[in-house]
Image: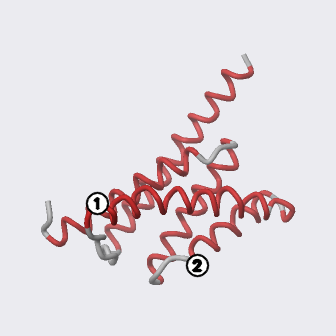
Amino acid sequence: MKEKQEKAARWKTFGIATLLWAGLAAAFSVLFPAEAAAPAGLAGVLRNCLVLPVAEELIFRGAALRLLQPLGKNAAIAGQAVLFAAMHGSWTAKAYALGMGLIFGWAADRAGSLLPGLVLHILNNGIVLADCLAERGIP
């Protein structure tokens, strides 16, 4: 019974994180047009849509979130989000990454897993890539 409740709680966390992510992503796409250049070829797609999201989730929601736990749960979530944002380019990209870092950090803490943030991160990077390619006129 407890395992079933934990599984339900993880799915609920994933659902809430997904809604938060979608709302923030939609708001930013309306307010700020895409700035990033689309990567070249399959290697660029794999890098931006798989390698970077996995690495960033391991580093920020995995290592940094755990290392900052002595500061308290909320401080750890905020701290890893600020570090995550600092690694991104322009000020609008940093602001967007801060929001994503807060959502992904909250989801990782609440679910006890990197999976919700990882799935959303991969999805996010794929959508950003598709948007960049569409702006270039590349189908």
Residue situated furthest top in the rendering: 1
Give the mark toward the camera: 1 or 2: 1
Is residue 105 shown left or right of residue 51?
A: right
**Going 25% across and 65% down the picture, which residue do you hit?**
41
Pick the quarter of the image with the C terminus: bottom left
Q: Return the residue nearer the eye: 71 or 55.
A: 55
Which numbered disc flags the more N-terminal residue, 1 or 2?
Answer: 1
Which percent across, then down, holds residue 35?
33, 78
Which percent across, then down, holds residue 45?
33, 61
Q: In this view, does 128 lie above or below 86?
A: above
Q: Which amino acid does label 1 sit on?
A: Leu
Residue situated furthest bottom in the rendering: 90
Which percent across, then down, holds residue 99?
54, 65
Q: Is residue 111 above or below residue 23?
A: above
Count of residue discs: 2
**Going 40% across and 63% down the picture, which residue do you hit?**
47
Is residue 73 shown left or right of residue 53?
A: right
In the picture, residue 13 is in which quadrant? top right
Which percent across, then down, holds residue 92?
44, 79
Mark 2 burial class by Cα count in 10 Å: few <14, some 14-19, many 20+: some
Q: What residue did someone put label 2 on?
A: 86
**CA separation, marks 1 and 2?**
27 Å
Is residue 114 shown left or right of residue 73?
A: left
Q: Which amino acid does label 2 sit on?
A: Ala
Pick the quarter of the image with the N terminus: top right
**Going 50% across and 77% down the picture, which residue do you hit?**
88
Q: Return the residue nearer the eye: 25 or 88.
A: 88
Mark carried by residue 42: 1
